[in-house]
Image: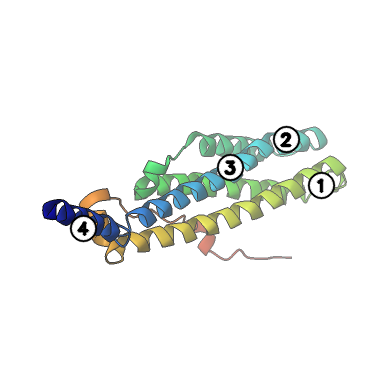
Amino acid sequence: MKTTMVKLIAFFLFFSSLSGCGYNSIQQNEETVNRSWGDLESQLQRRSDLIPNLVATVKGAANFEKETLTAVIDARSKASGIQLTPAMLSDPAAMAKFREAQGNLSSTLSRLLVTVERYPELKANQNFRDLQNQLEGTENRISVARQRYNASVETFNFSIRQFPNSLTNSLMLKLKPKEYFKADAAAKVVPGVKF
């Protein structure tokens, strides 16, 4: 009877100690990172889906530099071709490649919109204005999704480094820190405005 009672107490103490080791919270934080990544991917996909419509509208309403449209189509293709799985979020090289492709797409879209400024008849086209508003809204959603993803990465990375969670992670889970979604290097250069 006494042995059974000791085993029961030891069993209870073992499981109650697990509640303070961070095992569940670390996994919950990782799921939050994965969900945030999915939200970001969804917004990037939305942008990718809008681009063919934007290009088709511009192509139909203006006869201008073919090179700009080709660059947008190529950048979209490259950005859509790079897929990151939640398992790859800890790989700095994969994240850098993904960020570069997304940055190139943003850059070519900006060039397209600047080129369109030279064609007033296109700007007056209601379909184009609606599409441009959709694209602008999508870029804002992507920005918010990036911020949320980075916030969840911060929480996760801290949770696997915090004591006693760090012991739990090193002994049981062995999870690596996730990579932040960083700005493209070209974004650090301030654009010049000339009139």
Farthest front residue? 1
Dot 4 crowding, Cα within 10 Å, few <14, some 14–19, many 20+: few
| Label 4 vs label 2, nearer the camera | 4
Checking the image for residue 9, the label placed there is 4
Residue that label 2 marks: 53
Front disc: 3 or 2: 3
User: Is disc 4 placed on a helix, strand or loop?
Assistant: helix
Q: Amino acid at mark 2?
A: Asn
Inspect this view and state whether residue 182 appears: no
* Numbered mark located on residue 129 in the image: 1
Q: Are marks 1 and 3 in contact (CB under 8 Å)?
A: no
Q: Residue at x 47, y 58 (%)?
A: 152
Query: Which amino acid type corresponds to the residue marked 3 in the rendered image?
Result: Ser
Identified by mark 1, the residue type is Arg
- Left or right of residue 60: residue 172: left
Task: Measure the C-alpha gap from mark 4 to mark 1.
Answer: 70 Å
Residue 8: percent from left, percent from top:
21, 53
